[in-house]
Amino acid sequence: MYQTDMYEGLLAETTMLQGFHGDSLNAYFARPLGPGPFPGMVLVHHMPGWDEWYKEITCRFARSGYATLCPNLYFRAGHGTPEDVAAKVRAAGGVPDDQVVGDLEGAARFLRSLPTSNGKVGILGTCSGGRQAYLAACQVHVFDAVVDCWGGRVVMNEADLSPTQPVAPLSYTKDLACPLLGVFGADDQSPTPEQVSLHEQELKRYGKNYEFHVYPGAGHGFFYHHRPAYRQEQAVDGWNKIFAFLEKYLK
């Protein structure tokens, strides 16, 4: 617990890591200064791109005692403003699932290699990043906890599948090997409450360790304080639940 006489120090910078097929990608990295040991967190940015909000929460996690890495999953589309790069990615049908999983696995290995690591790494994503965080946690067993914030398209119909997203993440639920926290808005349309319920049924079917929180009066992206979707009361409670969950499983 924080005390006013404690030493505080933070390093935040862009760095490079090895991702899918050994590709080098850039990432935003923030860590507490001091000997540690510190748990790691991989943050999976949303469809609006590798943007300022994700840099901000990278530092928030670092201030809370996590060495935190947010890889730029869109770097292969070139560089520019987050909005311009994200538009190119959307026009191309999104980034391939296997590529994203490879990049996120590389991010986890980067964090575990740090001399200050406590050996544990969690993963969190919002929106498309929530879907990708869940998919990665099911497919590569390098994470000790996963947080899915309103990840759409975890539950997918046959018509929703595409060359970049060939399998619904829900289909991999049996392979999930770490605790899961889900944070959702009751007014969201992707995922809908019905899709959240289907996801929960699958988790129960396989006896997974999970907790879901669905917030009335909140829609998609209700943590985004710079957007009209922000819901202060629900967001504060959601953040409290996230940090309590990570404290339990990573620290």
Image: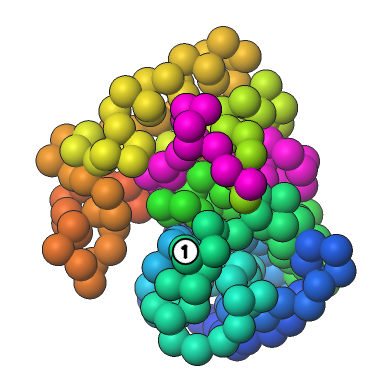
Q: At 14% across and 63% down in the image, what residue appears?
A: 228
Vertical placement of 200 versus 2: above or below?
above
Is residue 190 visible from the viewing direction of this image?
yes
Pinpoint residue 140: horizontal percent, then vertical percent: 76, 43
Crowding at dot 1, Cα within 10 Å, few <14 / some 14-19 / many 20+, comes out as: few
Residue to which mark 1 is pinned:
90
Q: In this view, does 212 lie above or below 8?
A: above
Q: Position of residue 191 (x, y in %)?
A: 35, 37
Apparent side of residue 129 relative to residue 176 in the rendered image (left or right): left
The residue shown at (47%, 27%) is: 157
Judge by depth and name the residue closer to the eye, 196 or 59: 196
Q: Within the magenta stretch, is there residue 5? A: no
Secondary-structure class at tag 1: helix
Report the front residue among 129 and 91.
91
**Residue at horizontal 54 percent and vertical 20 percent from the top:** 203
- At a point 48% along the width and 36% down the height, the residue shown is 160
In this rendering, position of residue 106 left or right of residue 28: right
**Visible in this render: residue 61?**
no
On-image quarter of the N terminus: bottom left
Q: Report x, y in % for residue 78.
A: 61, 83
Magenta run includes residue 147: yes
Q: Which of 223 and 246 is in front in this view?
A: 223
Tell whether 139 sits left or right of 248.
right
Magenta stretch: give its range.
134-163
Quarter occupied by residue 37: bottom right
Rendered position, 92 above or below 231: below
Q: Where is residue 216 in the image (x, y as percent from the top left)?
A: 17, 35
Residue farthest toward the right in the current orientation of the protein = 22
